[in-house]
Amino acid sequence: MGTITCSRYHDISCGHRVVGHEGKCRHLHGHNYRFHFTCQAQELDKVGRVVDFSCIKQTLCEYLEQRLDHKFIMWEKDPLAQTLRDVNTLGVVLVPFNPTAENLAKWMVEDVAPGLLAQYGVTLVECVVEETAKCKATYKL
């Protein structure tokens, strides 16, 4: 038997820095990120959907808008984190991981989505994070 999923993407702009990176990404910089969310349910709802696309928008997309859009994502262990927080308290978001596309995708699937999507009985089974049109990372359950 096949599996049915539904997907929605959302775009945000934000900055980050990758601690320990060998190249340009060790510097403060930003991206126009695109997050692709793929959800799955045990069964389709009475209308024949995994979940209404607006539910993904109201939860995962809105989370990105409120928490990350036009902000700067920093690993809480980054030596520059506190200095930047002192300069712009509301504009710097500290996370418990180095903010690579891979770690952002994993964080959305494992930590953010379960609490947000539980009310709809669906699971985020895949998140793709595009940093550019040419570069992306995927995390799947």
Image (cartoon, rainbow, N blue to C red):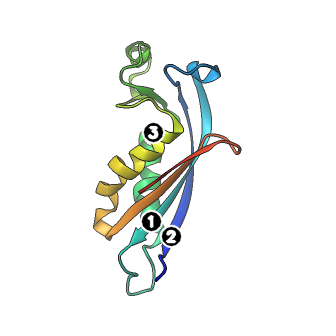
Residue at left 47%, top 76%?
3
Location of residue 122 with respect to 68 vertically, above or below: below
Which label's residue is closer to the chain start, 2 or 1?
2
Q: Quadrant of the C terminus?
A: bottom left
Judging depth in this view, the residue of 112 and 68 nearest the camera is: 112
Identity of the amino acid at label 3?
Answer: Asn
Report if the CB atoms under discs 2 and 1 are less than 8 Å apart: yes
**Disc 2 to disc 1, C-alpha distance:** 5 Å
Element carrying mark 2: strand
Q: Which mark is residue 103?
A: 3
Q: Which mark is residue 6?
A: 2
Identity of the amino acid at label 1?
Answer: Cys
Which label's residue is closer to the chain start, 3 or 2?
2
Location of residue 132 with respect to 62 vertically, above or below: above
Identity of the amino acid at label 2?
Answer: Cys
Judging depth in this view, the residue of 82 and 78 nearest the camera is: 78
Image coords of residue 18 (percent x, y)? 52, 25
Residue at left 50%, top 41%?
102
Q: Which mark is residue 39?
A: 1
Image coords of residue 84 (percent x, y)? 44, 16
Judging depth in this view, the residue of 32 and 130 nearest the camera is: 130
Left-right relation of 9 to 116: right
